[in-house]
């Protein structure tokens, strides 16, 4: 469930890392990650993305990405996949290794850039996206502003159905017949 998900985004001058504490990536999902255009979302209209290119957008030449490391729990084992950019207009070199150590997260993506401007641009996009994200995600140990925190602070009515989370302002509560 969304409200139980959590993640951390941490930055340095030229790096950004995104860590989640879910279940990791299965070998099938790793294979999709390694395949440009590989996706398991094309048959599901409820999911964002369907063309298998979202992950590869981090290699946009304007970001000056040097390297991306994905460390994940895969079927009980820690796996590290390294994508190294040798030419910004070509596919990155990919190396996969099994790690002989335990990890205390499910998946961590570390991105290394040539310039600090790229970190700022990524953080700006993350903040815009996280404004609507109902999960607990922290950026450099702080919870970014969100529509959900704003709704709680203002005592708006927050509702959830099977596939939808929503917010109603005070003057719309009578629609449900009771104040909550």
Image (cartoon, rainbow, N blue to C red):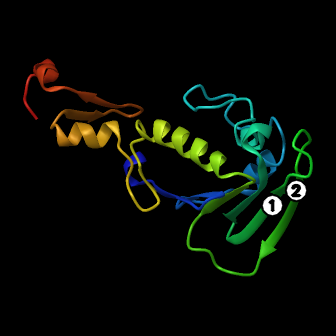
Disc 1 is placed on an element classified as strand
Give left or right: position of 113 versus 1: right
Q: Position of residue 131 (x, y in %)?
A: 41, 38
Quadrant in the picture for residue 46: top right
Mark positioned earlier in the residue sequence (2 or 1):
1
Q: Element at badge 2? A: strand
Residue at image coords 19%, 26%: 169
Whether residue 118 is situated above or below residue 68 in the rendered picture: above
Provide residue 54's location: percent of width, then percent of height. 70, 37
**Left or right: residue 48 compared with residue 170:** right
CB contact under 8 Å: marks 2 and 1 = yes
Using the image, tell me which numbered label, if any, was put on residue 51.
Answer: none
Query: Residue 24, percent across and down?
Result: 63, 59
Name which quarter of the figure residue 166 lies in: top left
Checking the image for residue 94, the label placed there is 2
Q: Quadrant of the C terminus?
A: top left
Rate crowding at label 2 as few (under 14), some (14 to 19) or many (20 or more) other CA atoms within 10 Å: some
Q: Is residue 16 above or below residue 165?
A: below
Judge left or right: residue 125 versus residue 6: right
Q: Is residue 166 above or below residue 12?
A: above
Residue 82 marker: 1
């Amino acid at each position: 469930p969304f409200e139980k998900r959590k993640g951390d985004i941490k930055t340095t001058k030229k790096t950004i890392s995104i860590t989640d504490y879910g279940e990791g990536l299965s070998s099938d999902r790793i294979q999709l990650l390694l395949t440009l255009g590989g996706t398991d979302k094309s048959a599901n209209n409820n999911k964002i993305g369907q063309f298998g290119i979202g992950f590869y957008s981090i290699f946009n030449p304007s970001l000056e990405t040097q390297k991306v490391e994905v460390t994940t729990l895969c079927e009980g084992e820690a796996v590290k996949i390294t994508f190294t950019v040798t030419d910004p207009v070509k596919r990155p070199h990919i190396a996969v290794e099994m790690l002989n150590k335990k990890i205390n997260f499910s998946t961590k993506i570390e991105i290394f850039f040539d310039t600090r401007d790229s970190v700022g641009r990524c953080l700006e996009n993350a903040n815009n996206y996280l404004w609507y994200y109902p999960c607990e995600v922290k950026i450099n140990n702080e919870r970014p502003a969100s529509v959900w925190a704003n709704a709680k602070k203002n005592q708006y009515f927050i509702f959830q159905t099977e596939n939808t989370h929503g917010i109603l302002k005070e003057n719309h509560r009578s629609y449900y017949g009771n104040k909550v």
